Image: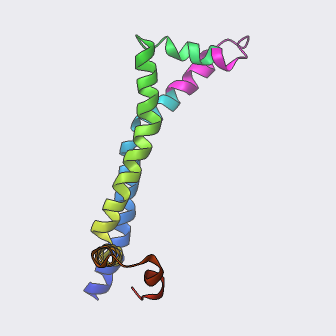
Amino acid sequence: VSTQSTGQNSPIKTVILLTFIYIVVNIPNFVYQIMLIRMVLSIDPGYNSIDSISDHIKQYFDTEFEYYYFWLLTYTLSTCLNSALNPLVYFYHIKTFRQFSRQVLMSSTVIRNKRSNPVNMINTKL
């Protein structure tokens, strides 16, 4: 019974860890979205332009560099960091993923070491 409950806890722990990583990595994005919503709600109804909304947001940053740096941080870096951490969590928590990764790495190393012809690789079983 204990092995069965341990096996069932592992996916739950993995999902919780992935959710936690997603939330932590995207905190700057959440802050930016909240800031954007507050700006849109505080703008006079006479402003109908997207440019006026971005100008309104830029006033909260000292320089334009900070604005674009924050934008880069919120969208690009948070997405890349989350995408880079997910396979590491999978590798650490999921045994079959670990075995498959090792098998793929070993087979690619064997193929590279043999320096075989690409036509022969199609016919060989990995």
- The image's colouring method is rainbow
Q: Residue at x 35, y 77 (%)?
A: 100
- Residue 95, how many percent across, how many down? 30, 77
- Residue 98, how many percent across, how many down? 30, 74
Report the front residue among 26 and 97.
97
Does residue 44 appear left or right of residue 16 in this picture?
A: right
Instruction: Give the quarter of the image for residue 88.
Output: bottom left
- Residue 71, how many percent across, how many down? 46, 28
Instruction: Give the quarter of the image for residue 76.
Output: top left
Image quarter where the C terminus lies is: bottom left
> Does residue 38 show up?
yes
Q: Total label count?
A: 0
Does residue 64 appear left or right of residue 89 in this picture?
A: right
**Residue 112 sits above or below residue 33 on the image:** below
- Residue 123, how many percent across, how many down? 47, 87
**Residue 33 sits above or below residue 120 on the image:** above
Instruction: Give the quarter of the image for residue 56.
Output: top right
Q: Please tell me whether residue 114 belongs to the stretch shown in magenta.
A: no
Q: Residue at x 35, y 74 (%)?
A: 97
Image quarter where the N terminus lies is: bottom left
In the image, the segment drawn in magenta is 35-51
**Residue 5 sits above or below residue 81 on the image:** below
> Does residue 26 show up?
no
**Residue 21 sits above or below residue 98 on the image:** above
Q: Please tell me whether residue 47 belongs to the stretch shown in magenta.
A: yes
Report the front residue among 102 and 32.
102
